Amino acid sequence: MPVTVTRTTVTTTTTSSSGLGSPTIVGSPRALTQPLGLLRLLQLLSTCVAFSLVASVGAWTGPMGNWSMFAWCFCFAVTLIILIVEVGGLQPRFPLSWRNFPITFACYAALFCLSASIIYPTTYVQFLSHGRVRDHSIAATAFSCIACVAYATEVAWTRARPGEITGYMATVPGLLKVLETFVACIIFAFLHDPQLYQRKPALECCVAVYAICFILAAVAILLNLGDCTNALPIPFPSFLSGLALLSVLLYAIALVLWPLYQFDERYGGHSRRSSDSNCHEKHIYYVCLWDRRLAVAILTGINLLAYLADLVYSARLVFVRV
């Protein structure tokens, strides 16, 4: 049965539902002793330890190290803000919808920490010689994994249940929007070298697809976080269905064009990794062009599946309203 999605306003009461089966105390330090409060303290501690270990030995050189450090610092800072708001009972004064913001951030944070837990050891740690720097980096990776699990647990705890009245971002389509925008950001990171797509209109079209779909999904998220869905000239579920359908069609085109022009030699592609001279040897902090081409192709397929699932769930919401 689809989840009912309605807009609600957080009031200044002493308890609120957290999706954990019991009320969560807000506006009091006792909020930290509740299951969700303890989980957020674990998130705060693990991200703090992760970036502290890396910063203490300067083990975050290069774009991949910078990404990992940003992920841990960003997650730590926003988690701290959420805890302050919860303990101080400041939800009514928070500029964004509190029904949607915490779970949206938790989903992003889980993906951030997951990417850091994979990227940091594979592109940085493995090249370090044995010693204090490597030990700190390995420990930071372990705490990053702990943070990822903690944030994913919060998403599982606080997501919408069938029949529950909650914010849109706590539903499956809302969480899929987070995944779609995050995967698009990873795609953009791999496309930072223009020679991957310049002077090939078909590949430039693919880049345009990634940008357009990212912007549309981001707009849907921002409308919910700002509680502005009523400002649309059409019903919000219809807007979501149209957005998902358009994104599916565009990503289907990209899934055909990107591999065709990147790996088919008839269209100027490179079918084998050995054809890229930069891939012959391991380079610290560097991902060779052929690997980037393959990564973008895989991520395109992942996002297409996410948009297909989004389309199914969004269409169900429209039918239920009708």
Image: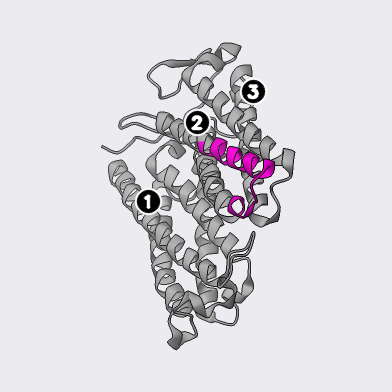
- Which residue appears farthest toward the front when viewing the image? 130
Disc 2 vs disc 3: Cβ atoms closer than 8 Å?
A: no
Say which residue label 2 marks.
Answer: 99
Around disc 2, counting alpha carbons within 10 Å, would you say few (fewer than 14), some (14 to 19), or many (20 or more)?
many
Residue at position x 64%, y 25% in the image: 93
Q: Tell me the tag on residue 310.
A: 1
The residue stretch that appears in magenta: 124-145
Q: Nearer the viewer, residue 58 or 158?
A: 58
Q: Main secondary structure of the magenta part?
A: helix
Distance between the alpha carbons at the discs numbered 2 and 3 = 16 Å
Q: Nearer the viewer, mark 1 or mark 3?
A: 3
Marks 2/1: CA–CA distance: 20 Å
Front in this rendered view, residue 290 or 106: 290
Pointer 3 local density, CA inside 10 Å: few below 14, some 14–19, many at least 20: some
Residue type at numbered disc 3: Ile
Return the residue at label 3: 84
In this image, 271 relative to 29: left or right?
Answer: left
What x and y, as percent, mark residue 147? 53, 35
